[in-house]
Amino acid sequence: MTDPKRQRLLTFRSGGWVILLTVFVGVVVVAMTVIPAWQRMQARPPGDGRDPATYGFALEPTLVPRASIVAGQLHRDLVPALVTPAVLPADGVGEANRRQRGKYLVGSDRVIGVEVAGESRAYPILVLSLHEIVNDELGGVPIAITYNPLCDSVVVFERRLDPGSEPLEFGVSGLLYNSNLLLYDRRADGDESLWSQLQHRAIAGPYAAAGATLRLVPAELGRWDDWSTRHPETTVIDFAPESLARYRETSYASYLRSDELLFPVDPPPPPDGPPAKTPCVIVDAGGVCRVYPIPAVIAAADADGLWEDTLGPATLQFHARSAPDLVRVTVGGEAATTRYALWFAAHALGRGCERAGE
């Protein structure tokens, strides 16, 4: 017969309390880890990273093939759009660089330059790479400055549909169409629409049903030193000090150098055209749209980097430079209405946008 004393080897007095305490602490740690994570999952914006229907947008009516809208991010607003960011004067950039012990903005950095009603502002690409949308006001006009790293695309437009209407505020939907950013208009009633960046129009939801489009604002993609020299009074959006390292660490350089497209594009670029990731400027003038591959413009430019072309009734002046390859376009000395994108995205625009030389 077994000795009862030997059966009771694990008692509270003999050290069982240590195991019980360990189990209790383990349960507490798991609870402290799992419960907040579960709560965050419940509180995060909609979207599962796979099915566009889970992002909470009305996908009817849809003005593009429904299957061409795909998930690009884990959920909506994973990339946080900016709203009326603080700004610095141009002569304050050097001090900001010194204060942060790092270079926020140097002369060779690319910026989106915009001038409205005599007020000019620069929006660094390194900031837009992390935010993609800036809801701002310039010269008394509410505008959206948008950038999509997948297409290296730049589009600036007014946020009012009509002169007297309330401005829209845009967020990053987490969805893509032809590998390009789809924005959404933030509404208290949740009845949002999806907007194509490059097409600057609503492609799904109530505004799509109404045929809504956004008016383009002239803008240029250029170097900070060029822009600030021509616009010494310019401001530039400020940065959050805690985000500076992320700005500099985020880079799409390897993607832009490769031939790989991460998401579907229809129609794909033709084999007899420029390489898929050739940078292009898209010019709209007189109701005509034309795509200009930037390397071709640079090759055609004279020793001063100047070249001219006619589009509809307008004579376009192209101001080209290399390292990096950049072009700004003017009409009669004023900024032309332009968009920028890689060739694969510009070609997929269709909708009557011709390629230069065709």
Image (cartoon, helix red, strand yellow):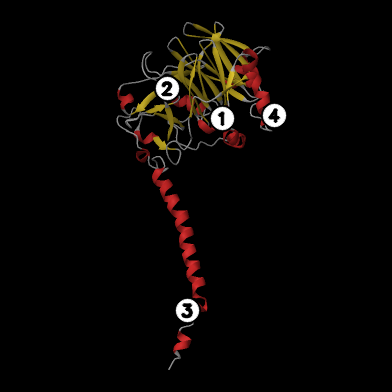
Identify residue for label 4.
98
Q: CA distance from mark 4 to mark 3?
A: 65 Å
Give the residue type at disc 4: Arg
Which three-letter amino acid code belongs to the residue tagged 1?
Val
Mark whose residue sits in front, 1 or 4: 4
Give the mark nearer the N terminus: 4 vs 3.
3
Q: Are marks 1 and 2 in contact (CB under 8 Å)?
A: no
Between the C-alphas of marks 1 and 4, the distance is 18 Å
Residue 20 seen in this snapshot: yes
Vertically, is 37 above or below 129? Answer: below
* Comparing labels 1 and 2, the label whose residue is closer to the camera: 1
Work out how far the residue at label 2 is from the one at label 4, CA to CA, in angstroms. Answer: 38 Å
User: Based on the displayed image, in which of its 4 quarters is residue 63 positioned?
Assistant: top left
Disc 2 target residue: 200
- Label 3, secondary structure: give it: loop
Of mark 1 and mark 2, the one earlier in the sequence is: 1
Q: Residue furthest front?
A: 13
Judging by the rendered image, the residue that carries numbered circle 1 is 127
Above-or-below relation of 219 to 70: above
